[in-house]
Image (cartoon, coloured by chain):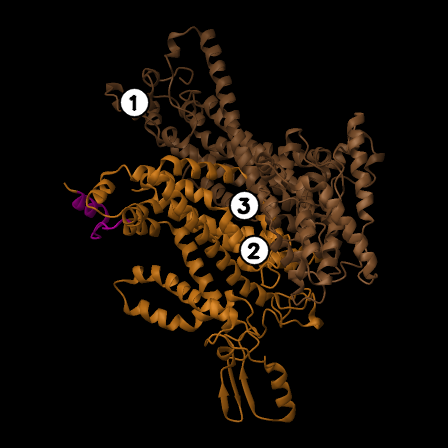
Chain colours: A orange, B brown
């Protein structure tokens, strides 16, 4: 009895999956909490992307004297409203999301392939635009227009009896919009989660804080995974002197407490931006990944297929990156998923200690305000948000770990 | 069965050797080598020189201790380069970062460097005292060229067309290069066509020619004599100055004095190769720091001027009591909890325990700490829940209490922080414990033990537990340094004046010596933690020997 018939007898008509990714995916799908976590992550990303449609002080639709405009969309790249690049990234995603969704819909057979590559594609697109956007070169994404106060406009129009129609998003506040009159107000019907010390809507800050947390997690982890893979692959594949040096380096980095290093670095950077925080987390957390990749490479390079690849005359670079690396990535994937949760925790911790970026809406900063002012809505909501995101990523990480572990397969 | 080791493991010369040299050993083929031992533990090898079963018990023990002693010694020796590497990395990070203590940027007043001589002088002395004027790792100041200094000097006068920032940088460099650039300054003074440039050079000549006293703790007469010579020269040189608006004659007189002085002492700046080498490696911040470190001197805090070591000892009691108690509690609760939920895998109780541990694991401790303070402390909005103080180590009036009362008072203050510190490590540890034990329970030898008809209790507690403890022991290495840095946030929230709070404060104030000392001590603790966890590996697992 071969494997096929055996599984058919056990599982019914479903044929055994062919590729490794498919096997892992099938295992992962059986783990209900992990799938729940994955959906939560997807929803969080959607919330982060579509945040301006939910919560913004510009109307979605504005009609005055028969002239119709859509101010939210017109202001998506207005530098006077969106200062930091994280917002620009997500706004770009918001604008391009129909295209991406269409692509996913049309490419039915390649959905997994495309789904894995779209974020990379988008990130590259963003990177191309980023320098131009920052330095204000001629660029469709660099717009500086005065901010129109639509609520004031609307009020004036109503007083004058003009016919003006405006549809605001459900929460008509921006996360940077301050209102001294509501400073430190508890939750009310206007401000669902209350207001902070500067009189900013907490709901808006929480929602846009999702963007910050997710970006921090993903970018910081990508940085250190990249560094770790390079170091680990070099050490594991070449061995000898390179291995010795890199192993010593890994050992040394292991002995320096990471949070300590991050604190020191963060305090040393003048005018910290959120990207500094990402880079700091990125350059301090790579040893774990490097160690994993090195161990995998030590194992893999002895296997016949890598010898065969070399014997076929493939260049070393190709053997390392196309033949060995994909097989060494499984444990890294798990570490990275847990790492996202860790990075989010570290960033909130830094903001909590007032060592983060003060210009971005970070949950940790809200929590710190709550602690200093003893306001429960400033403690509860950001704290729960951090807890939720961290546990969701941990769920996914655990699911992945179990799915990748062949001993747990039934 | 635990006392008797499976004989086939010791029957082999060295499993590692067999694997390396591919000796055709029939036994090797049947040797069940756990992957953990081959790949997991770097410095311990799975081997025994000869079968300990053949030895007398007393001989066995002493042989083991001898091996252990030499193994520990070896590990301690390996620690030295690692520790050095750590100190290099941390030192570079701390010192290369912008924002330095005692610079113009902190004293403010950018343009008035000539007028505000007093503050400039104090900044210079401050920087010199703490070696902040020295380069960080390598000192190549013997190679500074005349042109370089001239270019810097040109940026200084307030009528020069450079940005303020650049002027500050130039000023800082000229100030920090100190005694090394006297020849270049003299050259600039002699050759400068521009009068302001010449005056600037004379200004820097005066400040830079001041030397530190060579023997601050002079004991012999010769040393006192040397000190005296230097201070006399310092006093003389510090008088050779003029205001920009003084008459040209006075200026020329002073310049002539400088010229004569330099011609007399020119030899001081002609370095031999050995001297250059000594300067390149020796006269740096790093070398000075290590020189002090070898005398177990962590230097002086730049803020409080107290010796770092002394302050650290006084702070240690807070942090250590906090973390030792919470660590003990975490281990005491997590091991039984992990065993419990591993044994009852897939039952309802296991699910409850596992999921609540998962929740605890994901709860950030600063959130929990803040919540606890909000609800349960003296400042709480709910009068019935005002059980605990709002923070600190003890009540202000605790000195009047009896010693038992003081202990009670401290315990009362520590309740919440310990709770916060414990639950986080507790959750992690129990999850590891459960996973580790499950891993072991799945293995073949447990199946064998069960097949032999041993009771479940014996199987779990005598066969599985020791191996299941291994992963939790590795964690010890990471938990030990948490004594210092791990409780930064908790100490901040609860206002406990321990190492963590001190660290954060010194980071805010750029107190280099304190940061460095904390980094080195926690790195040392990590190294010791790794050693302890490796040793305890060997204690738990008799198959591992010291080599």
Marks 2 and 1, Cα distance to the nearest angstrom?
Answer: 55 Å
The image position of residue A342, as x and y in percent, is 51, 49
Q: In which quarter of the image is the C terminus of chain A?
A: top left
Frontmost residue, A231 versus A221: A231
Q: Where does residue B510 sit, x and y in percent of width and height? A: 67, 48
Residue reaching furthest left? A1
Identify the residue position indicated by label 2 in the image: A384
**Location of residue B278 (image quadrant):** top right
**Quarter of the image that includes the N terminus of chain A:** top left
The residue drawn where x is 43% and y is 49% is: A227
Query: Does residue B493 appear anywhere in the picture?
Result: no
The label shown at residue B18 is 1
Circle 1 Cα neighbour tier, 10 Å, few/some/many (<14 / 14–19 / ≥20): some
Residue interval drawn in magenta:
A3-20
Chain at tag 2: A
- Residue contact at pointers 3 and 1, CB within 8 angstroms: no
Q: Label 1 lies in what chain?
A: B
Q: Is mark 3 on a helix, strand or loop?
A: helix
Name the spot of residue A388 as percent of width and height, x first. 51, 55
* Mark identifier at residue B432: none
| Furthest residue in direction top, as rendered | B56
The image quadrant of residue B151 is: bottom right
In-image side of A384 versus A301 (left or right): right
**B199 vs B30: above or below:** below
- How far apart in space, not on screen, are marks 3 and 1 (Cα)? 46 Å
Q: Which residue does the numbered mark 3 point to in the structure image? A: B360
- Decide: few, some or many residues near mark 3? Use Cα within 10 Å; few <14, some 14-19, many ≥20: many
């Amino acid at each position: 009895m071969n494997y096929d018939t055996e599984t058919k007898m056990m599982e019914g008509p479903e044929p055994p999956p062919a590729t490794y990714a498919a096997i892992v995916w099938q295992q992962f799908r059986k783990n209900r909490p992990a799938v729940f976590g994955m959906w939560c992550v997807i929803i969080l990303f959607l919330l982060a992307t579509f945040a301006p449609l939910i919560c913004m002080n510009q109307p979605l639709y504005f009609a005055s004297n028969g002239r119709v405009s859509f101010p939210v969309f017109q202001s998506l790249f207005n530098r006077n409203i969106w200062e930091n690049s994280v917002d620009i990234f997500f706004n770009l995603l918001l604008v391009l999301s129909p295209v991406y969704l269409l692509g996913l819909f049309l490419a039915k057979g390649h959905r997994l392939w495309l789904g894995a590559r779209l974020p990379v594609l988008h990130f590259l697109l963003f990177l191309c635009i980023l320098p131009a956007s920052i330095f204000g070169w001629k660029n469709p994404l660099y717009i500086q227009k005065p901010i129109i106060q639509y609520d004031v406009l609307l009020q004036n129009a109503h007083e004058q009896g003009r016919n003006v129609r405006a549809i605001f998003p459900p929460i008509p506040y921006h996360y940077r919009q301050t209102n001294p009159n509501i400073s430190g107000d508890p939750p009310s019907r206007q401000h669902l989660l209350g207001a902070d010390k500067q009189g900013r809507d907490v709901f808006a800050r929480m929602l846009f804080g999702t963007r910050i947390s997710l970006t921090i997690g993903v970018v910081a982890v990508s940085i250190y995974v990249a560094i770790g893979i390079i170091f680990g692959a070099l050490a594991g594949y070449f061995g000898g002197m390179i291995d010795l040096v890199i192993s010593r380096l890994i050992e040394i980095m292991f002995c320096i407490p990471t949070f300590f290093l991050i604190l020191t670095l963060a305090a040393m950077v003048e005018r910290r931006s959120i990207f500094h925080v990402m880079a700091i987390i990125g350059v301090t957390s790579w040893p774990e990944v490097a160690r994993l990749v090195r161990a995998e490479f030590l194992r893999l390079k002895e296997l016949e297929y890598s010898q065969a690849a070399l014997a076929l005359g493939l260049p070393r670079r190709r053997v390392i990156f196309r033949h060995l690396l994909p097989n060494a990535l499984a444990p890294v994937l798990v570490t990275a998923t847990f790492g996202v949760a860790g990075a989010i925790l570290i960033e909130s911790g830094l903001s909590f200690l007032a060592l983060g970026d003060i210009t971005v809406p970070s949950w940790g900063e809200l929590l710190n305000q709550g602690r200093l002012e003893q306001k429960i809505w400033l403690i509860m909501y950001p704290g729960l948000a951090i807890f939720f995101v961290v546990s969701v990523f941990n769920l996914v990480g655990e699911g992945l770990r179990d799915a990748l572990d062949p001993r747990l397969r039934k | 069965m635990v006392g008797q080791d499976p004989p086939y493991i010791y029957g082999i010369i060295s499993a590692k050797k067999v694997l390396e040299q591919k000796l055709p050993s029939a036994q090797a083929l049947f040797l069940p080598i756990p992957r953990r031992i081959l790949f997991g533990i770097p410095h311990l090898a799975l081997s025994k020189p000869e079968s300990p079963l053949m030895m007398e018990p007393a001989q066995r023990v002493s042989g083991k201790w001898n091996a252990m002693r030499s193994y520990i010694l070896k590990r301690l020796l390996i620690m030295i380069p690692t520790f050095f590497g750590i100190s290099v990395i941390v030192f570079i990070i701390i010192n290369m970062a912008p924002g330095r203590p005692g610079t113009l940027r902190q004293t403010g007043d950018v343009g008035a460097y000539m007028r505000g001589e007093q503050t400039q002088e104090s900044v210079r002395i401050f920087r010199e005292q703490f070696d902040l004027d020295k380069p960080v790792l390598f000192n190549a100041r013997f190679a500074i060229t005349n042109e370089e200094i001239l270019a810097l000097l040109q940026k200084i006068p307030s009528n020069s067309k450079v940005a303020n920032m650049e002027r500050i940088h130039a000023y800082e460099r000229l100030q920090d290069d100190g005694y090394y650039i006297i020849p270049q300054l003299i050259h600039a003074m002699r050759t400068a066509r521009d009068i302001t440039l010449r005056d600037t050079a004379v200004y820097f000549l005066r400040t830079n020619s001041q030397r530190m006293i060579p023997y601050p703790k002079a004991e012999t007469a010769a040393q006192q004599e040397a000190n005296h010579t230097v201070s006399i020269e310092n006093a003389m040189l510090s008088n050779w100055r003029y205001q920009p608006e003084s008459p040209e004659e006075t200026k020329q007189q002073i310049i002539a004095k400088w010229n004569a002085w330099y011609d007399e002492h020119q030899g001081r700046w002609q370095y031999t190769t050995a001297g250059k080498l000594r300067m390149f490696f020796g006269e740096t911040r790093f070398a000075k720091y290590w020189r002090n470190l070898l005398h177990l001197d962590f230097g002086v805090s730049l803020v409080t001027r107290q010796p770092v070591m002394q302050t650290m000892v006084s702070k240690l009691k807070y942090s250590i009591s906090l973390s030792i108690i919470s660590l003990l509690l975490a281990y005491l609760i997590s091991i039984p909890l992990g065993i419990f939920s591993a044994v009852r895998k897939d039952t309802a109780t296991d699910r409850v325990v596992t999921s609540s541990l998962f929740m605890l694991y994901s709860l950030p401790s600063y959130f929990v700490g803040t919540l606890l303070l909000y609800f349960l402390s003296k400042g709480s909005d709910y009068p019935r829940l005002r059980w605990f103080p709002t923070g600190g180590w003890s009540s202000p009036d605790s000195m009047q209490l009896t010693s038992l009362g003081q202990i009670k008072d401290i315990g009362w203050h520590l309740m919440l922080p310990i709770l916060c510190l414990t639950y986080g490590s507790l959750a992690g540890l129990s999850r590891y414990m459960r996973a580790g034990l499950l891993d072991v329970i799945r293995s073949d030898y447990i199946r064998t033990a069960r097949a032999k008809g041993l009771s479940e209790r014996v199987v779990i507690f005598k066969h599985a537990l020791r191996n299941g403890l291994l992963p939790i022991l590795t964690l010890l290495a990471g938990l030990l340094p948490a004594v210092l840095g791990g409780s930064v946030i908790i100490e901040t929230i609860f206002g406990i004046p321990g190492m963590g709070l001190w660290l954060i404060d010194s980071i805010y104030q750029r107190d280099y010596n304190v940061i460095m000392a904390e980094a080195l001590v926690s790195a040392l603790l990590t190294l010791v933690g790794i050693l302890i966890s490796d040793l305890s590996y060997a204690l738990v697992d008799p198959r591992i020997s010291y080599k």
